[in-house]
Every structure is written in C-alpha cells, then in structure tokens.
Image (spheres, rainbow, N blue to C red):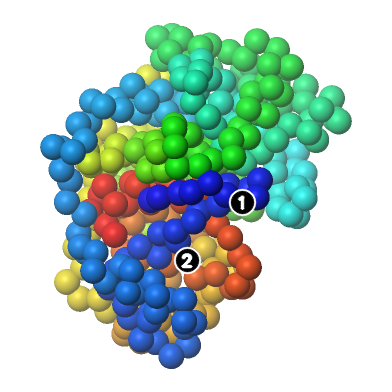
Amino acid sequence: MRIGRPSTQSFILRNPLYLAFTLIVAVLALFHGINTRLTLLAKQFISSPSIHTHSLLHMSSSTYSHELNIALLAVQRATLLTQHVFHNNAKGTLSKDDASPVTIGDFGAQALIISALRHNFPKDEIVGEEEAKSLRENSSLAEQIFTLVRESKLEDGKSEEALSGTVKDKDAMLEAIDAGKSEGGNKGRIWALDPVDGTKGFLRGGQYAVCLALIVDGDVKVGVLGCPNLPIDDSAPISAEVSTSPNDHGRGVLFSAIKGAGATSRPLTPGALAESKTIHMKEVKDISEATFCESVEAAHSSHSDQAAIASRLNITKPSVRMDSQAKYASIARGAGDIYLRLPVRKDYVEKIWDHAAGDLIVREAGGE
C-alpha cells in the first residue's frame, strides 16, 4: 500500500488497494454495469501475482518487532476501554462535521494508543481519526472519558509499563488525542490510527475494530487489528452475529502482520499478549464456492453492484455483511474469501486508517 501527501487536511488512500483481488477486479472490468475506472484497475492488477510470496530476505520479522509489540499491547489495552463502552447503554455519541458518529470509546481509545506511541516513538508522526475540540468545549464529557482512560490498564505490570502507564491527567489526554494530526506524505514514519473502526456497528452492537498501522516512506510495514467481537476460533464460520454478554470468553481476537513476515492471530486478553499462531487465507478452487464480505452500510459500498458481480461469477452463498476492518481479518484467516469496496459516488475518498492495517494483514496471509 503506497500513500502520497494529501492535498487537503484529510489523509486519504491514494491507491484504492481495497479492490485488491486480481481475478475479481479483472472480472469486474468485463462486467457491463461497472464504470470505466475499474477497467483501469484491472489493467493495474492483472499483471500482479495472485498470491503474495513472503520473502524474509527483504524484511526480517525482527526489523519491526519492537513496533509490533508496542502496537499489539496498545491496541489490546484500548480494547479494554472500548468493550467497557460497548456493553454500556450510554456511549456518549457526538456527530462530527461529516455527520458520522463518534463515541467516548473513540476518544478514549485514541488517547490511550497515541500516549503509548509518543512514549515509545517520540519522533514518529501520527494520523488519527479524532480530535479533541468538542471535548475541550464539554468538560463533563471530557472528565467522563478521562475516568475511562485512567481505569483502562493491562493486568500485566510489565506490559502496562511498556506503554508508559496511565495518562497522567485530563489535559494530557486531550493533548494526546490532538497529536494525531500528521498531514501524511511518502517520507518518514507515520502511524495511522482508527480507534473504533465501524462506529455505527459499535453503536448497534455489531462488529468493530481498533486499527493501527505503521507506514514507513509511504509503505505499510506493521498492521494490527483488535476485533473484540470476532470468535477466537479461526475455523469458525464467518458471521455478523455478536454476543451481547460481556463475559463471552469465546470472542476477541488480535490480528497482526509485519510486511514480509506473515500474519498471525491471538486471543485478546486483559493482560500480557497471548501466544500467536500463523493465519492463511483459504484456497478457493472454484470461484462459485467463494464467500463475499461486504459493508453493512450501503453508503460505504454498493450492495447492488456486488450482488450483480456475485451473480456473474455464479456465487450463490449470501454475502456476509459486517462493519469495520473485521472483514479484512475474517478473510485473512480463511473465514471469508472476497471483499470488494465499491464506492457509491465519484467524489467518495477513502481514509488511510480505514484500510492500512487490514490490507497488510490480508496480503501477509496470502491474499491480493
């Protein structure tokens, strides 16, 4: 995934790599209902290999092992806060300028993760989805969020210490939230953070993900997804169903990848990192047997276009609709096969934090 410096304050995904399945894009280009831009994409991807080959000669897993460890711990700690909010009926919802929702979970998770990143990598830039302006204007809400941030600690002392410990006060929390303002570019180290990807799913009790990626000179090197509502069992069939019980110990997965070193999953825990295992995409010998994943929100991707594509490919299994980059995670471990993001309007732009981590994890699991 390559990114360039955006012309506006929003940090966007320049190359739409979310349409990253060579065979499917090629078919899309031939399908009469798809616009001409997909034809160009087909030409771009058809020459690429359909299976990503890991080459440890190019990238040793130890190169970014410290960054990965901190990212895993930071995301795991943030999920403690988001799950507390998830199981609380009052999520403190606000509306941003683009009318999308933001919750106290978004603010709290961003504060925790950025605080850990700044402690460990003080020279790195960060681009995060949220800003603290509304909290500076609402002291009671800011205080409520700070209480959650202060109480969200990993049970393992060494792990918590590695993240710098608790955020010291409310002002430090607001400063951390506002530290995610990098304008991007193709030089240097930049962390891309979405503290709660799939906020609408989060609000309705569906799937969501805490997403973090490290981009170095425009290339994604590390990706981590915390998916509290996905089943731990990698062999579990893909489903949008979510348990409403805060004591469901069969759910909660932490996915990760370093470029060139493969992808892994491990159970989310309240303390030290659990043991990981390598994950792979499922081989699909007959495209008609594939399973599509797609967004719940029709405003994010065209459901009708995807249904037409499925019909053209003789895919009869119903698409599984779920929110967030949990779709990437599900595909990476073989629970699903295809994820297409088909914009519904020409002026729609993707944000880097919505795809960077998930795209890398899928590629490192053998996908394209």
Q: How many marks?
A: 2
Residue 326 rendering spot, x and y as whole percentages: 44, 50
Q: Is residue 256 above or below residue 291?
A: above
Mark 1: which amino acid?
Ser
Q: Is residue 263 above or below residue 176?
A: below
Q: Nearer the viewer, mark 2 or mark 1?
A: 1
Look at the numbered disc 2 and give the secondary structure of its residue: loop
Identify the residue at image location x=26%, y=47%: 364
- Mark 1 crowd level (few <14, some 14–19, many ≥20, 10 Å Cα): few
Q: Confirm or deny contact between disc 2 and disc 1 (CB under 8 A).
A: no
Residue 251 rendering spot, x and y as whole percentages: 42, 41
Residue 111 rendering spot, x and y as whole percentages: 62, 26
Identify the residue at image location x=77%, y=26%: 142
Give the residue number, with chain letter if any, for mark 2: 341
Horizontally, is 115 left or right of 220 in the view? right
Q: Is residue 53 visible?
A: yes
Horizontally, is 264 left or right of 112 in the view? left
Mark 2: which amino acid?
Arg
